[in-house]
Image (cartoon, grey):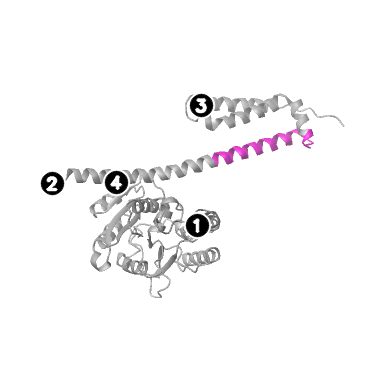
């Protein structure tokens, strides 16, 4: 059976473009380095897999995939799912902290209002 | 004389709020046997809710963004817990809960059983205001779920007319559900070992504004609350119980 040689340079180029967008967002401080390192790592690994298909072919065969493209899709979907879960955990934590801070702010503001109201009152 | 903080969560309730605050102000402390303070939690309203609250002589917690009913109620409960109130009573800002019924809740709180959380129920009195069929159906489903999970029969799990004792205040300062919190908070309370009781109260139709749960959101509400009750109960059972003596 003839070995099908597939090229994934286009996929590598897409990874590169996304990585450049990510770096631009980092430079503009729209996202933090801490939150985006894992995504950047994911793009580097996926880009390397696309640029060096022979190595990727060996890994996919070792893992039992007949077609390398299937391995690509599975790896990408699994990595994105993990990244999404991480993002959900972070987002939920931030959401809960933001609720607590909003409540604390309201309580402190009320206390301040009462203090300034009692200070402004003329002595009896 | 025990101190009671009446917490009124309000989101765009300028129409109903003024009348409600006047009713709370008209309560006779001596007859109730309790010193009553009033606190409105303005949940990021876009109308004149906060002005109405100030004019009504209430303490005002003004949230800088809309947190939903759970976040608003918890803000009031946190205030009550930190200022060591003996009880906090939640009354909805839409005027559905007549403040005069507060006496019934206090009576149960001061009974020998001394429950930590008392829910005012509209379903034990046949002459009471009846909500829509869909809501009654939803309430029935939640009763079934809560009975299975908490092993306690509660006739009105969606009622927001509630009295919280010291132990409930300590618990809900720490943790309180945010979306559609009423049934879920009952599961939290029971799982934490609090005594939950209910007493019949009169309720009436909302005096202004619109309900946040209508149409398709009712279905989302039912699914979300069912999952939340089941998850919350199992999660909360593993937590350290609330201390009897200190309420903390």
Residue marked by disc 4 = A110
Q: Are marks 2 and 3 on the same chain?
A: yes
B11 vs B118, nearest the viewer: B118
Callouts 4 and 2 in the same chain: yes
Q: CA gap, disc 2 to disc 3?
A: 57 Å
**What residue is disc 2 on?**
A123
Separation (CA) of disc 2 from disc 1 = 53 Å
**To which chain does the residue with label 3 belong?**
A
CA gap, disc 1 and disc 3: 39 Å
Q: Which one is earlier in the sequence, the residue at label 3 or at label 4? A: 3
> The residue tagged with tag 1: helix, strand or loop?
helix
Residue sitting nearer the eye, A75 or A20 = A75
| Secondary structure type for disc 2 | loop
Q: Where residue B213 sits: x, y (%)?
A: 45, 57
Say whether marks 1 and 3 touch (CB < 8 Å).
Answer: no
The residue where tag 1 is placed is B221
Precedes in sequence: disc 2 or disc 3: 3
Work out how far the residue at label 3 is from the one at label 4, CA to CA, in angstroms.
38 Å
Query: What residue is shown with label 3?
Result: A26
Q: Which of pointers 4 and 2 lies earlier in the amino acid sequence? A: 4
4 vs 1, front mark: 4
């Amino acid at each position: 059976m003839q070995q099908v040689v597939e090229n994934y340079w286009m996929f590598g180029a897409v990874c590169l473009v996304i990585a450049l967008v990510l770096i631009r967002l980092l430079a503009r401080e729209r996202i933090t380095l801490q939150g985006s390192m894992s995504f950047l790592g994911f793009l580097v690994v996926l880009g390397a897999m696309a640029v060096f298909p022979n190595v990727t072919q060996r890994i996919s065969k070792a893992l039992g995939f007949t077609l390398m493209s299937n391995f690509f899709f599975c790896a990408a979907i699994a990595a994105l799912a993990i990244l999404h879960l991480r993002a959900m955990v972070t987002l939920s934590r931030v959401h809960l902290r933001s609720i607590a801070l909003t409540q604390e702010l309201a309580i402190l503001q009320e206390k301040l209002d009462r203090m300034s109201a009692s200070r402004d009152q003329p002595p009896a | 004389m025990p101190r009671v903080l009446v917490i009124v969560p309000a989101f765009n309730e300028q129409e109903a709020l003024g009348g409600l605050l006047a009713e709370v102000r008209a309560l006779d402390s001596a007859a109730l046997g309790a010193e009553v303070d009033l606190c409105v939690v303005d949940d990021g309203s876009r109308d004149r809710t906060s002005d109405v609250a100030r004019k009504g002589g209430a303490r005002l917690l003004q949230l800088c963004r809309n947190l939903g009913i759970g976040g608003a109620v918890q803000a009031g409960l946190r205030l009550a817990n930190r200022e060591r109130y003996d009880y906090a009573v939640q009354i909805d800002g839409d005027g559905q809960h007549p403040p005069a019924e507060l006496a019934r809740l206090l009576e149960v709180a001061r009974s020998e059983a001394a429950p930590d959380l008392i829910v005012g129920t509209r379903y034990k009195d046949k002459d009471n205001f009846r909500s829509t069929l869909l809501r009654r159906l939803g309430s029935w489903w939640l009763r079934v779920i809560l009975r299975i999970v908490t092993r306690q029969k509660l006739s009105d799990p969606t009622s927001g007319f509630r009295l919280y004792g010291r132990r409930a205040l300590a618990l809900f300062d720490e943790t309180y559900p945010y979306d559609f919190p009423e049934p879920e908070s009952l599961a939290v309370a029971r799982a934490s070992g609090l005594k939950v009781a209910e007493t019949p109260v009169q309720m009436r139709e909302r005096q202004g504004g619109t309900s946040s749960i209508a149409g398709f959101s009712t279905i989302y509400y039912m699914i979300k609350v069912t999952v939340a009750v089941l998850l919350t109960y199992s999660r909360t059972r593993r937590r350290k119980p609330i201390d009897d003596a200190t309420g903390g």
